[in-house]
Amino acid sequence: MFAPFNKLVDFHTHCFPDKIANATVFALHNNSGAIPHTDGTLDGLLNNLQNANGTIAVNLPVLTKPTQFESVAKFAIEINKRFADSSVKVISFGGMHPACENIEEKMQFLKDNGIKGVKIHPDYQETFIDDDGYIIILEMAKKLDMIVVTHSGVDDGYKDKPVLCTPDRVLKVIEKVNHNKFVLGHYGAHRQWEEVYDKLAGKDVYFDTAFTFGSIDKELFLKILEKHGEDKVLFATDCPWHDINADKLALLSFGLSRETLEKIAYKNACKLLNISL
Ligand SMILES: [Zn+2]
């Protein structure tokens, strides 16, 4: 198939330290039923990226406990060091937990170590997105010019539990902290896309497309894109839970203009990450 872009940034992926990668992926698979497309390792992620002719994968670690901050930060710093001189690479963010002590210091530590952003996950962290802990993380990110990516909407591993990051709660967050480097994972809110269209599309936040292709109708995807604006949508897969090449082909099948595709595939991401490709 003719690809109208030759660069690709996947803004939402996951990998784990070699020692725990297989067990972690297996546990997550057991919980959600999602089939992994890598073995969960950094090399597995890199292979999946290269298989899609991709350029950059952004690794988004999730802290399920505040005490994981240091080990996750260490892994992220190692990844970034390994790929410092590579053109095809994984860039790792850090993870933050709303119950972390000294959030400001921790964010500053990440910033000082060249980390461009942090991942938060209300469902795994058992905290509503409009909790004070997340507000502090967002305020600090705004101050330090760092990106915050949140899981948003239904998590397939937590289907029977209340959703802790809903469009209504995100609206409250946006009212409190207007941070234009805030990324809502899963195209605004996974499986709550009608609400995304009504309430969030057009706001000054980014949507990533992680775990979205294959679940959303093409019409709804395009309707949200039209209202939200093509400058604030980031190609993302949630690899290993989606295959990067398969999602790239899905995006290509939506009949978008070359200009729009290039923005979603890498230009918006480069701007947000402050890099050039
Ligand atoms: Zn994810």
Image (cartoon, rainbow, N blue to C red):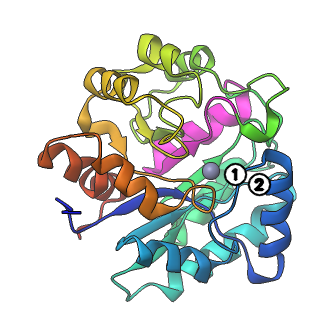
Q: Position of residue 34 (x, y in %)?
A: 71, 51
Segment tinted magenta in the rendering: 130-154
Q: Residues within 10 Å of mark 2 (few under 14, many from 20)?
A: many
- N-terminal label among 1 and 2: 2
Q: Residue at x 83, y 35 (%)?
A: 126
Q: Please state if 141 lies on the left or on the right of 158 as rendered.
A: left
For the residue marked with disc 2, what is the amino acid?
Answer: Leu
User: Does residue 246 appear to the left or right of 59 in the view shown?
Assistant: left
Classify the position of the N terminus by image quarter.
Answer: bottom left
Secondary element under disc 2, as helix, strand or loop, is loop
Magenta stretch holds residue 138: yes
What residue sits 59% from the left and 13% below the top? 168
Outermost residue to the top: 198
The reply to whether the C-beta atoms of the residues labelled 1 and 2 are less than 8 Å apart is yes
Q: Is residue 87 above or below residue 197?
A: below
Residue 63 numbered tag: 2
Disc 1 residue crowd, few under 14, some 14–19, many 20+, Cα 10 Å: many
Ligand 1 within 8 angstroms of badge 2 C-beta = no
Q: Amino acid at mark 1?
A: Met
Q: Position of residue 236 (x, y in %)?
A: 45, 52
